[in-house]
Amino acid sequence: MSGTYVIDRQEHAGKLILMVISSLAAVLVIAGLVYATGTSARHQAALAAAGCEPSLFISGFPCTTEQMIASQYQAIATPATQQLNTAMAAYAVNEGHNLAAAEAGLSAEVATEQAFDNSLAAMTFTPQNRATADALIQQATSTGNPVPSAAAIFTPQLTAIADALIQANENLAKVATEQAQSRSLTQMRSFNHRIQAASATVQTEMKLIRKALDSPPPAG
Amino acid sequence: MARSTGGRWTGEPLAAYDYQPTPYSGPDTYQPGRYRDDAIHTPKREKAPADDHQPQQRAAKSRLDEWMEVDFKFGGSRIKRKAVALILLGAPAVLPLFFMLPALITLNSNTFAVSVDDTLGTGAELCLFLCLLVTPINTLTGQRWFVPLRRWYGIMMACCAIGDATAASITDNFAGGVFGRLAGHVFELMGFIMVMLVIPLLITGNPWAQRKLGRYWKMLHRLIYVIWGLLAAHLMLLEGFGFQRGSDGSGFAGDGDPIFHQRFYQYSVCSLFLLTLRLPPVKRWIAARQKEGRNWLVYLTIAPIFALFLFGFIFIVNEEIFKGIDSFTEHPSAE
């Protein structure tokens, strides 16, 4: 076999290899580009298949299902609403004749509102909450357990609504605190219209967050 | 059989094929070593009479290398353009380690446990590919000014891999103590072997060791190809041979690009380019086309393979930046 022939054969082999691989690569690149055009549709489909609500999906974060986040919100909102109703009822009964009892009712109202705010803040999209949720998810994944509902956090969009609710609730708690410091029942009742206005704002924000979560109003 | 000077090549300039028209006296067999050297590096070729675009092309190549050698004034000192280019191209290789720095300073075990594999592991993969990219680019362009980057990327690859293994041995959740965390699963064992192999390369990755080891140095550093192969096994097993999805594979729920995020696929498309341009027949074909002054044909043929390489590489870089920034802010992503 001559050296020239070997050179020729080697070059020919090189050409053949390159042609085959290059053609394959061209097909793969085109296929990849075509595949890339369907990214958005696949994203939506993948979320739906996993039971994730697209509006609740956080990029770079494992999917949070609508059910998880709604039940987590309900777990906060339902007892808070019940306690609040009880405290408001106690105030309504006593505002006409018993200053101390009315004050106690208002203090319970304030405490409930603050607890609700704190619980809601723990679900907002903050770096700290995200890290906590990540750690919970990581732990659940490594041990093979289901992801706990405590790992559910709001998206940045939902966090904006939750922040508005927290702010409205803080405002309500502030007015209720001032009301509880009243020296007379008359002075205490004079706050009622301010309380109603602040409560209406809270109700509006709660409706917004329930709508975003597609969650029913809390019982009680 | 006498060496043929005609046949299929009749009419084509012999000089362009690096043919040495000396009387043939040796065995009528192929001598790979001699042939390869001739095909890839042929000083005589440059002296051969020009029959096409060869001289301009070679001159252009050497001009860029020469341009890189020129000094320029910066502040009170003179710096070579090449040095600036090498620093700019080499600096990104530090990023994986830089991303983990805050977690190291604050001893944030959560960040290490969750994302060190993604940040340093992917960083090591990127550095390995960049290290392996130097030779094909040299083959294609004929330029040599960027060759020092090969060592730098290799060193950074070793640092990332060792850092990844060290952190995994301390913070991973696998049972079996340090060894269990390092080699308790087959994919981990592959990674562990890779790290063990990379250590001697890191130790001997300097001119002193190169001098001391002589011809054995090159043989030793061919271990990089073993590491390259083991990485395929590591990634293949890590993500269920490229088919697994979810937390143990790519594509968490909501991922619209599960195929692009499969690490094994990314590895494969990047390796295709790096491997193809290392095949002797391919190198020979490229060298012959370059000698003919038909570099455009080389670029045209290689373009789809390089595009595929870029396709995969971009997704690896995206993964590194995404996970790296999460690690840097100490809010690691479990995705």
Image: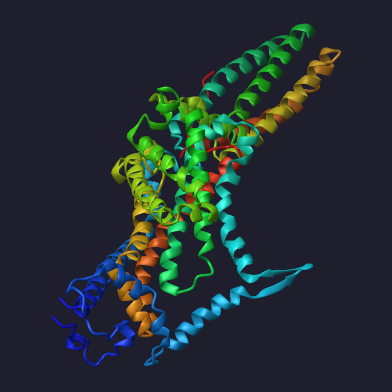
Visible in this render: residue A3?
A: yes
Q: Residue at x 35, y 45 (%)?
A: B230
Decide which of B16, B309 is in the foreground and name it: B16
Residue B269 pos. (x, y %)? 35, 58
* Left or right of residue A83, residue B201 in this image: left
Q: Residue at x 30, y 65 (%)?
A: B279
* Left or right of residue A78, residue B128 in this image: left
Visible in this render: residue B262?
A: no
Q: Residue at x 70, y 73 (%)?
A: B72
Residue occupying the far right of the picture: A183
How many marks can you see? 0
Q: Does residue B208 lie above or below B143 as drawn?
A: above
Q: Does residue A166 lie above or below B197 as drawn?
A: above
Colour mapping used in the image: rainbow
Decide which of B257, B39 is in the foreground and name it: B39
Residue A191 pos. (x, y %)? 79, 23
Residue B208 pos. (x, y %)? 54, 53
Residue occupying the far left of the picture: B1
Decide which of B30, B195 is in the foreground and name it: B30
Q: Residue at x 50, y 41 (%)?
A: A58
Residue occupying the far front of the picture: B25
The quarter of the picture where the N terminus of chain B appears is: bottom left
* Left or right of residue A143, residue A174 in this image: right
Residue A36 pos. (x, y %)? 38, 58
Q: Does residue A26 lie above or below A134 as drawn?
A: below
* Left or right of residue A7, residue A59 in this image: right
Which quarter of the picture shows residue B99?
top right
Decide which of A78, B59 is in the foreground and name it: B59
